[in-house]
C-alpha cells in the first residue's frame, strides 16, 4: 500500500507537534507555513544575536508535553527554571502576589479578605476537575467566594484588561485552569523558543517530511474519496490523503468554501494581541511579570524579561514587554509605531520616576490577530468538531484546548492527540 500523505496547514506548536508524530509513524508529511519562520505566535526575532519571542513566553512546571518534547529534541539542557517575581501594580505600588505568603501580605486588602482570597485559591488548586464550575461565570464565582472587594481590587482589572466588554461573561472553568495548573516556578528555553521550532522542523525533515515556510494556503478543496487539494502560494496545487488545519476556525472557513455554513457557525470570538518590546540600557523595575491593576495605563501587563534571564544574553539590553489583548478592530492595531510609543512611554515614569525615553535603545511593535479566544460560558458546545464535514479534513486549533488558556504546551498536546486520531482514521 502506498504511504499515506498528510498535509498540515500551520507551522506553530500544534501543527509541528502533529507533523513530527505522524512522520515518526511513517506518514509522508508536508507542513505549510505562511510566515518565513516556524513557531506561529511563539516565533522569535533576534535581539543582540539571541532569539526573543515577539510576545512574552514562559512555561509552567505542569507543562509536561512540551517539556518532554524539548528533552526529546535534545534541548533539555537549555531549560532555565526559576521563581522570578510575579507582581501586581495597585494604588501606585508594586506588590508581589505569587504565593500564599504574598497573598497574606497583600496590604491593599483587609486581613479577612486576604484570608478569603487565599482560601478560595487553595480550593481551586485542590479541585481536581472543573465540571462543578461549568455554566458559571468567573465574575459571579469570584464575587461569591472571594467577595466584592477582592474581585474589584485583584480580578476585575485583569478580566477587563484581557476581555474588555466581554469580561463579565468569561467562563469559570477557564479561570480554574489558570489557578489549578499554574506554578510560581517558571521555565524558559535559553536562546528562545524559536530553537524548539527550528529543531522540530529539522526532526520532521530528517524523517522524510517536507516543511515549507513562506507557503500560504489560499484555498482548500475536498477530493473525491477523501482528503483535499490545497492551493499554496508559490507551490501550486498540493494533494493529500488527509489534511490537518491548525488555523482559527474563521480563517479555515474562508479557505474552504465547500464547508456548510453550520460548521463552526458559533465559533468563539478571538481578540488580537498587541505588544511593544523595549530594549533599555538599564532595568526599569524589579518584577518579572507585572499585572497593571491601576487605571490610566495603555497596557495590561508589563513583562521585564531580563528580570528572569540575564541581560547579558541580549548584549546587555534590558528587555521589557508592554502587552495588551484587544478586539481586533481596536485603533491601536492601525496606529503607527511612533503613535504607539508616544502613548506607551510617558506612563513608565509613574512606575519609575527616573525613567527617560533616552533609556530606550531599540523598540518594536508586534501585532497578532486571533491570539486569545474569548472563553465565555457554554464555550465547549460552540467548538466545531475536529472531523470536519469534508472527509479526511480535520481542524484543531488554539480554541480547542479549553478549559486551558492559550499555551504552547496545550497546542503540543493537542497536536500529538490529533496525530493519533489521523493514524487511527486512515
Ligand atoms: C501575548 C501572548 C503571550 C503568550 N504567552 C505564552 C506563554 O507565556 N507560554 C506559552 O506556552 N504560551 C504562550 N502563548 C500562547 C502560545 O504562543 C500559543 O498557544 C501557541 O504558540 C499556539 O500554537 P498553535 O500552533 O496552536 O497556533 P499558532 O501559533 O497561531 O499557529 C498557527 C500557524 O498557522 C500559520 N498560518 C495562518 N494562516 C495560514 C495560511 N493561510 N497558510 C499557512 N499557514 C498559515 C500562522 O502563521 C501560524 O504559524 C502566548 C500567546 C500570546 C499571543
Image: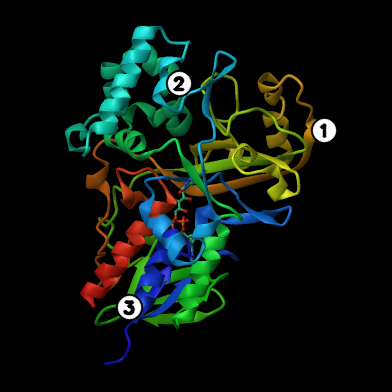
- In the image, residue 28 sits, relative to residue 166, either above or below, namely below
Judged by depth in the image, the label closer to the viewer, 2 or 3, is 2
SS for tag 3?
loop
Q: Are marks 1 and 3 in contact (CB under 8 Å)?
A: no
Residue 272 is situated, as x and y percent measured from the top left of the image, at 50, 43
Measured Cα–Cα span from mark 1 to mark 3: 54 Å
Who's the residue at 32% across and 78% down the image?
A: 25
Q: Position of residue 364 (x, y in %)?
A: 69, 45
Residue placed most toward the observer, 23 or 40: 23
Q: Is mark 1 within 8 Å of ligand 1?
A: no
Q: Residue at x 44, y 77 (%)?
A: 30
What kind of colouring is applied to the model shown? rainbow
Mark 1 or 3: the one toward you: 3
Point out residue 195 in the picture as x, y percentages from the top left corner. 57, 61
Above or below — where is 61 with respect to 18? Answer: above
Q: Is residue 348 left or right of residue 232?
A: right
Would you say residue 254 is visible in this rendering? Answer: no
Residue 312 relative to residue 229: left or right: right
Q: Is mark 3 within 8 Å of ligand 1?
A: no
Q: Which residue does the numbered mark 1 point to in the structure image?
A: 358
Left of 295 or right of it: where is 339? right
Most extreme residue toward the left is 132
Q: Earlier in the sequence, mark 1 or mark 2?
A: 2
Residue occupied by mark 3: 25
Kindly identify which numbered label has been placed on residue 403. none
Which label sits in the foreground, 1 or 2?
2
The mark nearer the N terminus, 1 or 3, is: 3
Disc 2/disc 3 C-alpha distance (Å): 48 Å
Amino acid at each position: 500500500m502506498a504511504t499515506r500523505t498528510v498535509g498540515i496547514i500551520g507551522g506553530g506548536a500544534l501543527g509541528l507537534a502533529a507533523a513530527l508524530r505522524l512522520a515518526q509513524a511513517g506518514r509522508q508529511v508536508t507542513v505549510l507555513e505562511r510566515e518565513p519562520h516556524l513557531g506561529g505566535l511563539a516565533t522569535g526575532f533576534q535581539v543582540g544575536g539571541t532569539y526573543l519571542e515577539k510576545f512574552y513566553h514562559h512555561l509552567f512546571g505542569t507543562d509536561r508535553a512540551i517539556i518532554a518534547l524539548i528533552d526529546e529534541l535534545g534541548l533539555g539542557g537549555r531549560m532555565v527554571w526559576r521563581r522570578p517575581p510575579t507582581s501586581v501594580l495597585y494604588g501606585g505600588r508594586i506588590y508581589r502576589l505569587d504565593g500564599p505568603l504574598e497573598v497574606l501580605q497583600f496590604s491593599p486588602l483587609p486581613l479577612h479578605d486576604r484570608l478569603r482570597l487565599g482560601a478560595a485559591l487553595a480550593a481551586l488548586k485542590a479541585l481536581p476537575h472543573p465540571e462543578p464550575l461549568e455554566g458559571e461565570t468567573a465574575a459571579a464565582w469570584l464575587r461569591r467566594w472571594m467577595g466584592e472587594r477582592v474581585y474589584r481590587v485583584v480580578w476585575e482589572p485583569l478580566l477587563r484588561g484581557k476581555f474588555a466588554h466581554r469580561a463579565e461573561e468569561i467562563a469559570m472553568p477557564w479561570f480554574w485552569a489558570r489557578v489549578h495548573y499554574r506554578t510560581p516556578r517558571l521555565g524558559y528555553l535559553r536562546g528562545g523558543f524559536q530553537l524548539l521550532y527550528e529543531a522540530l522542523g529539522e526532526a520532521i525533515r530528517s524523517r522524510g517530511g517536507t516543511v515549507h515556510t513562506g507557503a500560504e494556503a489560499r484555498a482548500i478543496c475536498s477530493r473525491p474519496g477523501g482528503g483535499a487539494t490545497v492551493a499554496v502560494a508559490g507551490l501550486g496545487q498540493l494533494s493529500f490523503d488527509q489534511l490537518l488545519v491548525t488555523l482559527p476556525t474563521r480563517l479555515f472557513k474562508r479557505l474552504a468554501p465547500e464547508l456548510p455554513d453550520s460548521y463552526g457557525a458559533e465559533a468563539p470570538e478571538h481578540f488580537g494581541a498587541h505588544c511593544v518590546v523595549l530594549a533599555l540600557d538599564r532595568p526599569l523595575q524589579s518584577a518579572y511579570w507585572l499585572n497593571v491593576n491601576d487605571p490610566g495605563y495603555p497596557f495590561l501587563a508589563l513583562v521585564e524579561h531580563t528580570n528572569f534571564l540575564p541581560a547579558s544574553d541580549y548584549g546587555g539590553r534590558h528587555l521589557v514587554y508592554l502587552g495588551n489583548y484587544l478586539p481586533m478592530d481596536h485603533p491601536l492595531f492601525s496606529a503607527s509605531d511612533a503613535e504607539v510609543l508616544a502613548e506607551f512611554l510617558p506612563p513608565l515614569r509613574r512606575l519609575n520616576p527616573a525613567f527617560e525615553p533616552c533609556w530606550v535603545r531599540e523598540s518594536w511593535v508586534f501585532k497578532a490577530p486571533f491570539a486569545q479566544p474569548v472563553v465565555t460560558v457554554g464555550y465547549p458546545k460552540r467548538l466545531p468538531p475536529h472531523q470536519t464535514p469534508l472527509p479526511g479534513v480535520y481542524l484543531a486549533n488554539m480554541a480547542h484546548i479549553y478549559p486551558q488558556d492559550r499555551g504552547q504546551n496545550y497546542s503540543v498536546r493537542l497536536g500529538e492527540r490529533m496525530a493519533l486520531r489521523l493514524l487511527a482514521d486512515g
